[in-house]
Amino acid sequence: MTLANEPRRFLPLAEGHGGRSSMTCLYRCGNACAHPAPNSSENAYFGDAVTAEVSRRGIFKAGAAGALVIGASAVGATPAAAAPTGRASAAASSTKPASGAGLTFKPIPPNTLDTVIVPNGYDDQVLIRWGDPILPGAPEFNVDRQSAAAQARQFGYNNDFLVVVPLDRRFSRGLLVVNHEYTNEELMFRGYAGGATATVEQMRIALQAHGLSMVEVERVDGTGEWQVVTRGRRRYNRRLTATTPMSFSGPAAGSALLRTQADPGGVRVLGTLNNCSGGLTPWGTVLSGEENFNQYFVGADGAPAAAKPALARYGIDISKRYPSGSRYWDKADARFDLAKNPNEANRFGWIVEIDPYDPESTPVKHTALGRFKHEGAALAVADSGKVAAYMGDDERFDYMYKFVSDRKLRQGSSKSDRENNRRLLESGTLYVAVLGFTSASEIDGSGKLPSDGAFNGTGRWVPLVRDGKSLIAGMAVDEVLVHTRLAADKAGATKMDRPEDIEVSKVTGKVYVALTNNSNRGAAGRAPADEAAPRNANKHGQVLELVEDGDHDSETFKWSLPIVCGDPADPSTYFAGYDKTKVSPISCPDNLDFDAHGNLWISTDGNALTDHTGTNYHDGLFAVAVEGPDRGKVKQFLSVPRGAEQASAAVLPDNRSVVVSVQHPGEITGATVDQPASTWPDGNFARPAVIVTWRPDGGEIGA
Ligand code: FEO
Ligand code: CA
Ligand code: CA
Ligand code: CA
């Protein structure tokens, strides 16, 4: 809908954390922000960590530009000095300049309208919503006649990351692959009064509403519009849920830490939980990140004492049997009771690989990529053929990671090529990021730009596991991979402002990291502001740009912050030096994607900016050039309904459609099915849904 034809309506907003309803905090993250951030490690800040590392190794590994000196003004003073130096970024000079080409649309204003708003000249349509049938025999959705058996064959709840993989050469038909991050039972079931009084059938429905959906879609009349295929065999349609059998791969498969009564071998697990973002591999599989898995478990107070420190480091409440907001899933399945099955939580928090082209395939949880609150994984291939996976651990003061495969990608499509590629994520080096700064002494927590004109610095990828062996004293390899946060604490990793989605530009090879916010930055007893997290009580977040020294398998890099988010009138914001009067306000960057021109598309979660009445503006989708004269010119493309998060967007390869995940509409404290805070998309109660937006005139998205 465009602004011209939108009926206006205003409803009061009950506030939770920042721009987020407290209901979202409860159901999505298990109230993460209400609890102390679980990283209480005294892991050294950059100065200490690097000094120790330098003396241990003798020298900071030289980058392609020559040996680096540690400390203030170690690298050049301007972002230009952090320019591409190697193959990972060499494409920048050899391909067409991405100087904001393709972003001539007129931005929409920030707003509080209970619908999806797109720019004039665009159309939008719901593709699929929670409960829509996708497998044979699935009933039509009926909010009053839900069952676990029905939900197992219907589209799941709270769609997040999505991708459309082609099903034919012309890409007129595709398979929409979607994560379902979490359930909000208050908005699913009439009269729901909390986990303690929930029925076992409600719990089983919620288990089936998690996971992923795969849905065949087709282009409408050669345009940018897409629709769900509703006839014929639809052989690729599939549901994965919290009970679908999956296997473990890699060095920690079979570890004692993964063994349970039901799986004494530690190699097989039921289901996937809290699937947030993800990625597509060059060999055609889909990766999905298990994020806030902690919230599904109960009984940690009764777990063995030896298991408790690690449970706590992953945000599991070890003080009581049923933490507030518990779903009481132990009543439906005892494996969620950590007093009885203390290792079950270790079986979540992984990157899952799924082959969408083989509906019979068993999804694989790759232990080589470590276990944390995985936002997602972004893949890039080095010239060596090795595959790098960039990954964020979305928690305040947690870390950014990279995995580099031992094996090399094979481009062919023979059986042996496919088998090789399917094993790429089974073994490799797992690193965590340690950042260095150029202007450390000037960072005061206000967000004031340093005198060298940039928030920037160097970085090292510190290995935790290499050649199947642990590099962390006192931890075996399976301990490092299952308790990766504890290993990274010991490695002196840099505490960041909630590393969310990461995306690699196919045009330049540069890596972009969404750092969404961090209410605790600079708080008493917490890490102070630093050059990569330059604001205390960071409400609006920032975007980090990372350029490897050489290639994606490098162990050093340069970084800078092209965007420090917020209201452009706020002096603590930064838009790569672009004229701030010409950019859209943006808050809480979460998920990232690129269009065909190399422009970055940013989805937001938890917009903390407000209108003149104090009402939070809704989340949205923003596009920004990251190269050329328009670098930093953020433009708002879309906004989502009340209480919703703009969870994820995929610009399709022909640049004529954007598929958008509208998550948790109406998720405002006090809202119910009968008293909804949003009536999107059908005018009755709120249902999470995936939409597509396109230009009826056939033009490119954004242009
Ligand atoms: Fe599920 Fe980090 O957002
Ligand atoms: Ca600087
Ligand atoms: Ca992404
Ligand atoms: Ca999100």
Image: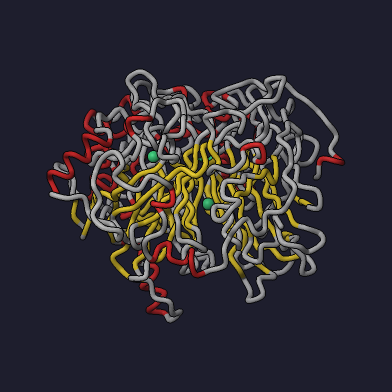
Relative to 315, is 51 on the left or the right?
left
Figure quadrant of the N terminus: top right
**Image position of 561 with respect to 310: above or below:** below
Q: Nearer the viewer, residue 658 or 190?
A: 658
Q: Is residue 499 visible?
A: yes
* Residue 551 position (above or below residue 532): below
Q: Nearer the viewer, residue 520 or 624?
A: 624
For the C terminus, give its image quadrant: bottom right
Q: State the residue in front, 458 or 145.
A: 458
Q: Which residue occupies 72% across, 61% down?
A: 700
**Where residue 675 appears, x then y in whole percent?**
74, 25
The answer to whether residue 212 of the structure is visible from this angle is no
User: For this rendering, which residue is in front, 481 or 19?
Assistant: 19
Q: Left or right? Give the position of 644 relative to 95.
A: right
How did the renderer colour the structure? secondary structure
**Where is residue 406 drawn, in percent x and y?**
28, 65
x, y percent for residue 549: 33, 58
Q: Is residue 239 above or below residue 71?
A: below
376 is higher (above) or lower (below) than 113: below
Quarter of the image for residue 527 reads top left
Q: Residue at x 31, y 26 (%)?
A: 302
629 left or right, relative to 326: right
- Determine the residue positioned at 73% across, 37% down: 109
Residue for point 38% across, 71% down: 409
Q: Total number of numbered labels?
A: 0
- Write down the quadrant of residue 569 in the picture: top right
Q: Which percent across, then down, holds residue 581?
A: 66, 37
